[in-house]
Amino acid sequence: MAKSAGIHHITAIAGEPKRHVAFYSRALGLRFVKRTVNFDDPGTWHLYFGDEVGSPGSALTFFLWENVPPGKHGAGEAQEIAFAIPEGSLEFWKKRLADKGVMAEEKTRLGETVLTFDDPDGHKLELVASKTASAIPGWGGGEVPAVHAIRGFHGITLELRHPERTARVLMEVFGFAPERSEGNRQRFLAKDGPLGRIVDLRTTPGLAHASQGIGTVHHVAFRAADDAAEMAMRERALKLGLQATEQVERLYFRSVYFREPGGILFEIATDQPGFTLDEPKEKLGSKIALPPWYESRRAEIEAALPPLE
Ligand code: ZN
């Protein structure tokens, strides 16, 4: 069975563009790997942040929808986005976040040290000290030195009323295996990784249902090594009675979407071709990238987009 190597990308909804870009590219020091538009709505930005090339397992992407109301955290939601930092970098990050006026709280969870904080739109973020991250070189082209840089995703927490149904999807569609649990949290692990291998399922009794908007995650994409693996995962999703789309061309990857039984939108995304498709590695994110089918409308599209910096 073709298994997923974990999270490919996470896409979330953000509001005010300048504040948003400053937070992710400057304060968190992620590389701004792609500035493009929402392929389904080219009047709005779709921004990608990640490691040096936005590798699968590192790509955090945002729809900038200034005109939608703020979302509400709750059940049926992909909630905390956890990044992996090297084990020796906790003190650096505690100081950096404090210097930037970001309130962070330190916790121990499943034997790991976790710094939790919110982004300016209310997204719940975490930095997790990870041995795996220590072994991966960091990108030091931004404000954060390479030695302390965020390496990519540690994982994500899904808040669910009935986690067993989502667990079945993780195991049977993507090949995740159950790992440790603690309290109301059950951890699932993808076959390899190395980044973004973890999906935690959490149930908080009595929690109201989430509503989507600014400050909430839009969908979570899982890696497929190639088209054949993607189609195999799609078939398995259909067998579980889930309504999976046909394959959709996203230029930097090819995607299939379905809503898992807990209400969260899942995507299957191919590892190839990646973000160097239309820009060289050293120039990633430096200009507005448009898919070929919007090129003829470039002037009109660019003029309508709000400034980012
Ligand atoms: Zn996506």
Image (cartoon, rainbow, N blue to C red):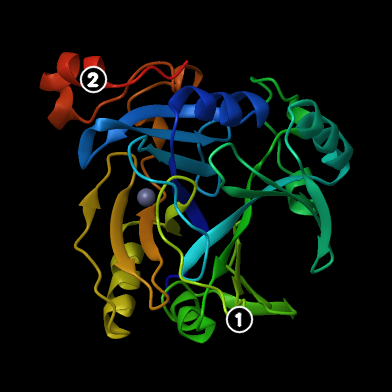
Q: Residue at x 44, y 22 (%)?
A: 285
Instruction: Give the residue type that dot 1 points to.
Output: Pro
* Picture coordinates of residue 20, whole percent (x, y): 51, 30
Q: Residue at x 62, y 80 (%)?
A: 178
Residue 81 versus residue 89 in the image, above or below? below
Residue 151 versus residue 143 in the image, above or below? below
Q: Residue at x 76, y 40 (%)?
A: 103
Residue 168 visible (yes or no) = yes
Residue 172 horizontal side relative to residue 31, left or right? left
Q: Are marks 1 and 2 in contact (CB under 8 Å)?
A: no
Q: Quadrant of residue 184?
A: bottom right
Q: Quadrant of residue 109?
A: bottom right
Residue 56 versus residue 243 in the image, above or below? above
Residue 4 visible (yes or no) = no
Which residue lies under the disc numbered 2?
Answer: 304
Mark identifier at residue 293: none
* Picture coordinates of residue 108, whole percent (x, y): 84, 62
Which residue lies under the disc numbered 1?
Answer: 205
* Picture coordinates of residue 286, whole percent (x, y): 43, 16
* Picture coordinates of residue 12, whole percent (x, y): 45, 47
Q: Of helix, strand and loop, which one carries label 1?
A: loop
Residue 292 horizontal side relative to residue 57, left or right? left
In this view, the mark in front (1 or 2): 1
Instruction: Give the residue type that dot 2 points to.
Output: Ala
10 Å crowding of disc 1: few (<14), some (14-19), many (20+): few
